[in-house]
Amino acid sequence: MTTPLWRTKPVSSAADSQTGLKRVLGPWQLVALGVGVTIGAGLFSLTGVAAGQNAGPAVTLSFVIAAVACGFAGLCYGELASMIPSGGSAYSYAYASMGELIAWIIGWDLVLEYTVGAAAVASSWSGYLASLLGGWGIHIDPRLLATPMTPVTMPDGSMALAWFNLPAVCALWGVTALLMRGVSESTTINTIVVCIKLAVIVAVIAACAPHISFEHYHPFIPQNTGTFGQFGMSGVMRAAGMAFFAYLGFDIVSTTAQDSRNPARDIPIGILGSLLVCSVVYAVFSMVLTGVVDYRAMANDPSPVATAIDVAGMPWLASLVKLGITAGYISVLFGLLMGQARVFLIMSHDGLLPPVFSKLNASTHTPWTSHLMFAALTSGLAAVLPIGQLGNMTSIGTLLAFIIVCIGVPVLRARYPDAPRQFRVPGGILVPLLGILSCGAVMVSLDRLTWIRLVVWLAIGLAVYFAYGIRNSRLCRRES
């Protein structure tokens, strides 16, 4: 008899979980969702931060390293999603393969990943909004554009301390209101926004490419300063760790199985399709960005694309691009806030969280309670924490989820060798092993404070699990 900590949910049960959500999403909508989330703050903001603080022009190499590691993980996601087409992403896969305790840990980790990720995106969006409005002669009080106690320059040249990031808070509540209207309506808007965002990226590359200065690429990998993670190869790996923040998209796709019309087929398409598109976009875009703007100037720039457009000297294009990016961030927030609520909904459905989180609104069939709670939590983080800290916290959560998923593939092959799989990872155990090693290598390159925050968050989660989840689990009730 297994102990409560290691009891597993049968694959058939995990796949057949019914939550009451409407199945309205097809493969192209899932690809759009993945691309919409992946191409956001990681591209438009953290590219500059990672280049300026860690990797220099080699941030392109960092994105390639992250893409390769994500490719291994993405293939594993594809197999598990075709085998267990259930919402909850890595949480559901871990529940079927490694037991309830590991499932809880990864579910709690996903909440950190999506919550902090949404806060980071909202913080970056605030910078682009201020740049856009500034070009139109509309200026937001600088004290409402940064985290508390951050020194800011006032219009008269004097220095002051910031209050909080108001636009970030407004963005999060606005997208939450959109999600609460229903999935069908909001995904249509999301698809339109994604198309606009891709058009903006093409326009930026075309406009900035002629202004590339090859001097900005030398040295391609700046010499290490003597501190691990500040340039050199350790800086490239540290930036790769931050880049995982950029690849949240296909993880978000796997949370929408209960919203998908044919999840066993469509989820792998959404995961692998969005990963392929975004890997190419990130590599090309980061190369152009660091060629136009000296990486040293981007160390603390929350809107480096706006800076690049200004350097290119195309004011007629600047406002259009900034408007497109500002609108494009909505699709990122949409996916992250949607993923948060879906993970909590599945965990609540399994009895590990109170039933209020799986209760759906009668008219829109959306989990209003979760949406409202996460809007409050995420907007609080966005208001007071700087984007660099938020990005690292998101990355370590993503990496942990990827490792768990890669472990789940061989475990489930051994436990359920004959279970139907519409997609199977090629190469036997090699790809999952490479996924574990590559994600682990990037994970250990992250700074100590980020690890401490992860440990503290997981400790809080374990306290919640032992106080509530272990006794109220549906599997526990079945055994009693």
Image (tube, helix red, strand yellow):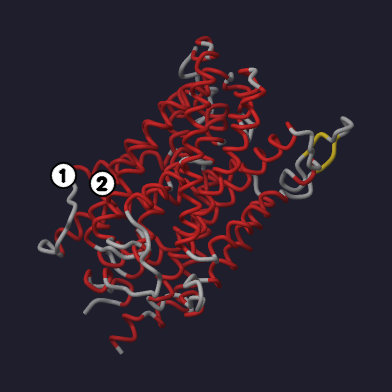
Considering every residue shown, the one lying at the far bottom of the view is: 480
Location of mark 2 (residue): 75
Q: Residue 250, percent across and down? A: 37, 49
Q: Is residue 104 above or below residue 270?
A: below
In the picture, measured across the screen, residue 91 lies left or right of residue 416, that is right
* Position of 153 relative to 226 (above/below): below
Amino acid at the residue labelled 2:
Leu
Q: Secondary structure at mark 2?
A: helix
Dot 1 or dot 2: first in sequence order is 2
Question: Which kind of residue does numbered mark 1 sit on?
Answer: Pro
In this view, the residue in front, 264 or 474, is 264
Residue underneath mark 1: 426
Report how far apart the C-alphas of labels 1 and 2 lie in the structure: 8 Å
To which quarter of the image does residue 303 belong?
A: top right
| Local secondary structure at mark 1 | loop
Is mark 1 in CB contact (under 8 Å) with mark 2? yes
Q: Residues within 10 Å of mark 1 (few under 14, many from 20)?
A: few
Q: Quadrant of residue 98?
A: bottom left
Q: What residue is shown at x 57% (from left), y 36% (from top)?
A: 45
Residue nearer the viewer, 252 or 192: 192
The residue positioned 44% from the left and 65% from the top of the image is: 342
